[in-house]
Image (cartoon, rainbow, N blue to C red):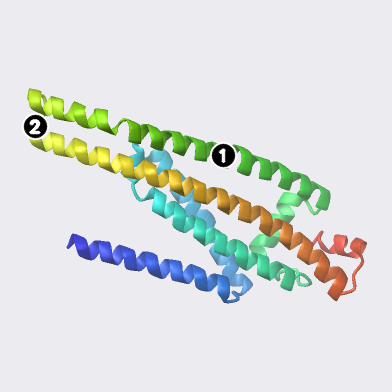
Amino acid sequence: MRLGNVRKRWVCSAILAVSIVLAILIPIPPIVIDFLIIFNLAFSILILMLTVLIPKPTDFYIFPPLLLLTTIYRLSLNITSTRLIPLNASRPLGAGLVILTFGTLVTSQNLVIGFILFVILLTIQHVVVTSGAERIAEVRARFALDTIPSRQLSIDADLSAGFITKNEACAKRRATAIEQEFYGTMDGATKFIRGDATVAIVSVIVNGLVGLIIGIGQNGLSIAKRYKLTRF
């Protein structure tokens, strides 16, 4: 029964991964992009609430692989929106209502303010959040690995002295193994997230440059006219 559940989990993960890859290759309508972005935001908030409410990190043992899947999902959204924005730049809703609304709110319909906010958010995400999370996960994983021998010896000593039963010793060994695996996978997941942050930066820069090239080169617009269009 347990093997069947594991197989179902792997099949669902494989289907999700293939769907994400297909979303990158196949053009998606803007209305579908809106739904996918809203789902991503809602699911991210749900994960955040779970991480805050769960008493122990190891209780949420599926968090590292879930983090990897959501990161791949977000990467596919970045690539898909990067394709839609330059291709449909002449249409107000060419990239979807969510992207247009968020861009209008953040930039206040001003390119200079949008650029300043982009630099600030870039610094916070890439330098503070991503680097800090990666360092914390690395130190915690190293600490968990270094303390395993002493914890195993402590469990064996307590078992030999009769302070704990054999079942309690097995439970503690199992908890130690789960903690080791959890923090080890978290260390790898945070390194993957750093790459996601870099891709997000590149996608924003590519959107701006390609939008200027298409507007000036193909549509014959001047830079001033293109700037007016960027103000929605």
Residue kind at label 1, given as amino acid type: Ser
- State the residue at coordinates (51%, 51%): 192
Quadrant of image for the C terminus? bottom right
Q: Point out the image quarter for the N terminus.
A: bottom left
Which quarter of the picture shows residue 170? top left
Q: Residue at x 59, y 67 (%)?
A: 33
Q: Which residue is mark 2?
A: 165
Please state which amino acid type lies under the numbered disc 2: Thr
Residue 159 seen: yes
Q: In the rendered image, which residue does mark 1 sit on?
A: 131
Q: Position of residue 130 (x, y in %)?
A: 56, 42
Q: Is residue 195 left or right of residue 183?
A: right
Q: Residue 53 at x, y = what percent? A: 39, 39
User: Is 75 on the left-hand or right-hand side of 85?
Assistant: left
Q: Position of residue 155 (x, y in %)?
A: 18, 29
Q: Position of residue 150 (x, y in %)?
A: 25, 28
Assess whether mark 1 and mark 2 are in contact (beta carbons under 8 angstroms). Answer: no
Near-viewer residue (64 or 39): 64
Characterize the local packing of mark 2: few (<14), some (14-19) or many (20 or more) Cα atoms within 10 angstroms: few
At a point 72% along the width and 50% down the height, the residue shown is: 106
Badge 2 element? loop
Q: Nearer the viewer, residue 154 or 16?
A: 154
Q: Earlier in the sequence, mark 2 or mark 1?
A: 1
- Badge 1 density bin: few <14, some 14–19, many ≥20, Cα 10 Å: some
The answer to whether 48 is drawn above or below residue 38 in the figure is above
